[in-house]
Image: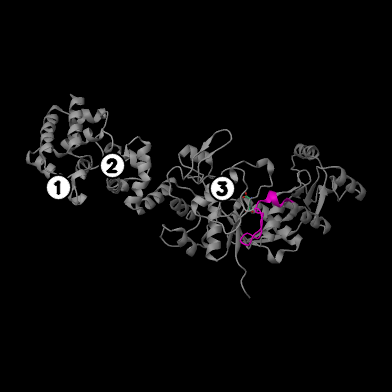
């Protein structure tokens, strides 16, 4: 028998920005499909018009695109959701609101076969039932117990049903959940599950008011029509699984129903509960792939804007809930395609660790060439007001090479090395007190004179001499002079650093001299001397 082509889908509802947990769901679907040589489809589940948020769909697609999670079907190369069928996208439209006419007939078919019924109860009537139950310390559920006393096509005479269907518009079609049956289900991650139907209510499948299906109906019908073979989604959908199984059975599609895999939640850093935007705000990390500004103007930070490489973000997400079974942690998305497996997805929640996220980014930062880093750093320099025309690219490249080990993000570079571009305007008070003693200042004035007479090569005059050679030469000469005079190395170096940087910390003195050049060094020492007088 020829194996069916694997087809999976990511089916977001455009109700806001995509949480990183959602990106992980999309990623696992993508990896699964690509490994099997199958198709990865995006379907927009927008039948709940009340929760629709403008811009959310575009956000979701842009986010997946940034991550390199590119669909085979559903979204075109221009990033637009496909609306009319073509060879590559045979199941268009992929936006459920545009598939509206499809669903009613399926719901009616269930009624015909005794699996569903029309319900005419108004919201107020159902509310009253709920209150009544509450008063008796019970929970109202619309099911086999209560449906016989409610207003529906199972209880009302046929002519009244016909009349209500024709003259009113607030009725719904509900699934007729069987009494006391065991639904037997299998999940690729969680194994075998059984649920008694008595715990489930008669879910609304279709609403006359807006002529739209609910999530459950649209989801099952579309997964069937789109020939989905595996449904990989978040565990918040696990409670819906019995209904979905029953719907497949009611439609007579059990033989071709997809296999299911429910992914565990992403947990807060302390492991207690679902990772939320609030945790991110509180602990200072993003929970969304891209920045998002809501209708009230409230900004949620994004991994992209925080300076993460998409490859690092994807790598980190892949390992949040899955492991390769080895110690290896760094994988490209193509490597992940090769080794991903649902069997190695964990059942328990995956705890988010921001330090680990930063570590991933640092690893990817180190993989960049110095020239790539320079290209990424130059716009930041411009933003900071540095006249970048004054520095050639090699200068920035060599500087990036020197500082990259100290950074998690390119955005950290500025804090690490701003003094290479602008002289300090003030000096850390504590350091001044500690280091600028009259004795040291006397020494510094001699050191200044020595540096002035030093025959050295700096960046601007190095020509073909390798940087390391120039720096070592400066180092040997300067430390040789200090040693010769038996001065305290630490005191002299820290004072120089204070005058070069503004505080007694920073990169090696010889490196600083090489980059900023002798003339600027002398200027900074004089400025320092004047300031601490
Ligand atoms: N529209 C659902 C969501 O927003 C999809 C659930 C599913 O994949 O079945 O998560």
Numbered range of the magenta stretch: 83-100
Asked if the beta carbon under badge 3 is closer than 8 A to the nearest atom of ligand 1, the reply is no
How much space separates mark 3 and mark 1, taking CA atoms?
Answer: 54 Å
Sequence-wise first label, 2 or 1? 2
Q: Residues within 10 Å of mark 2 (few under 14, many from 20)?
A: few
Residue positioned most to the bottom: 1
How much space separates mark 2 and mark 1, taking CA atoms?
Answer: 23 Å
> From where the camera sits, is residue 342 visible?
no
Q: Name the residue under label 2.
A: 391
Residue closer to the observer: 441 or 394: 394
Q: Mark 1 points at which residue?
A: 473
Q: In which quarter of the image is residue 120?
A: top right
Task: Choose mark 3 or mark 2, whichever is in front.
Answer: 2
Q: Name the residue under label 3.
A: 60
Colour scheme of this structure image?
one colour
Is residue 88 highlighted in magenta? Answer: yes
Q: How crowded is mark 3: few (under 14 residues within 10 Å), some or many (20 or more)?
A: many
Q: Residues within 10 Å of mark 1 (few under 14, many from 20)?
A: some
The answer to whether 271 appears left or right of 494 in the picture is: right
Residue positioned most to the top: 533
Q: Where is residue 127 in the image (x, y as percent from the top left)?
A: 77, 38
> From where the camera sits, is residue 219 visible?
yes
């Amino acid at each position: 028998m020829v194996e069916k082509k694997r087809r999976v889908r990511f089916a977001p509802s455009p109700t806001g920005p995509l949480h990183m947990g959602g990106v992980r769901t999309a990623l696992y679907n993508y990896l699964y499909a690509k490994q099997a040589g199958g198709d990865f489809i995006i379907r927009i589940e927008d039948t709940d018009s009340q929760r629709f948020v403008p811009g959310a769909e575009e956000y979701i697609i842009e986010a997946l695109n940034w991550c390199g999670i590119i669909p085979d079907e559903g979204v075109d190369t221009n990033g637009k959701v496909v609306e009319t069928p073509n060879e590559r996208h045979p199941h268009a439209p992929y936006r459920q609101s545009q598939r509206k006419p499809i669903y009613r007939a399926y719901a009616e078919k269930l009624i015909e076969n005794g699996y569903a019924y029309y319900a005419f109860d108004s919201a107020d009537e159902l509310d009253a039932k709920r209150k009544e139950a509450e008063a008796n310390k019970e929970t109202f559920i619309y099911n086999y117990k209560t449906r016989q006393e409610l207003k529906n096509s199972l209880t009302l005479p046929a002519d009244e049903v016909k009349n209500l269907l024709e003259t009113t518009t607030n009725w719904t079609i509900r699934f007729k959940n069987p009494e006391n049956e065991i639904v037997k289900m299998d999940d690729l991650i969680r194994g075998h599950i059984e649920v008694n139907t008595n715990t489930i209510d008669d879910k609304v499948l279709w609403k006359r008011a807006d002529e739209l299906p609910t999530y459950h109906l649209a989801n099952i019908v579309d997964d069937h029509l789109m020939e989905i073979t595996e449904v990989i989604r978040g565990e918040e959908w696990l409670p819906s699984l019995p209904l979905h199984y029953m719907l497949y059975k009611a439609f007579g599609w059990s033989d071709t129903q997809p296999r299911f895999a429910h992914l565990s939640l992403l947990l807060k850093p302390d492991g207690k509960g679902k990772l939320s935007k609030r945790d991110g705000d509180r602990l200072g990390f993003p929970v969304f792939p891209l920045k998002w500004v809501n209708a009230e103007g409230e900004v949620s930070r994004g991994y992209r804007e925080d300076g993460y490489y998409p490859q690092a973000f994807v790598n980190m997400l892949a390992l949040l809930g899955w492991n390769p079974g080895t110690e290896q942690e760094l994988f490209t998305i193509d490597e992940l395609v090769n080794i991903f497996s649902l069997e190695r997805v964990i059942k328990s929640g995956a705890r988010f660790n921001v330090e680990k996220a930063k570590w991933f980014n640092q690893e990817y930062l180190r993989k960049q060439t110095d020239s790539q880093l320079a290209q990424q750093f130059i716009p930041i320099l411009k933003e900071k007001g540095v006249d970048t025309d004054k520095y050639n690219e090699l200068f920035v490249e060599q500087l990036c090479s020197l500082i990259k080990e100290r950074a998690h993000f390119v955005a950290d570079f500025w804090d690490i090395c701003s003094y290479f571009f602008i002289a300090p305007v003030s000096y850390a008070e504590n350091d001044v007190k500690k280091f600028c003693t009259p004795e040291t200042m006397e020494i510094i004035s001699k050191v200044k004179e020595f540096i002035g007479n030093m025959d050295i090569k700096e960046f601007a005059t190095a020509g073909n001499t390798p940087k390391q050679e120039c720096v070592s030469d400066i180092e040997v000469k300067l430390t040789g002079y200090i040693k010769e005079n038996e001065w305290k190395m630490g005191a002299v170096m820290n004072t120089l650093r204070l005058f070069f940087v503004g505080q007694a910390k920073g990169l090696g003195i010889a490196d600083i001299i090489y980059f900023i050049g002798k003339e600027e060094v002398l200027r900074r020492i004089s400025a320092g001397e004047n300031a601490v007088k």
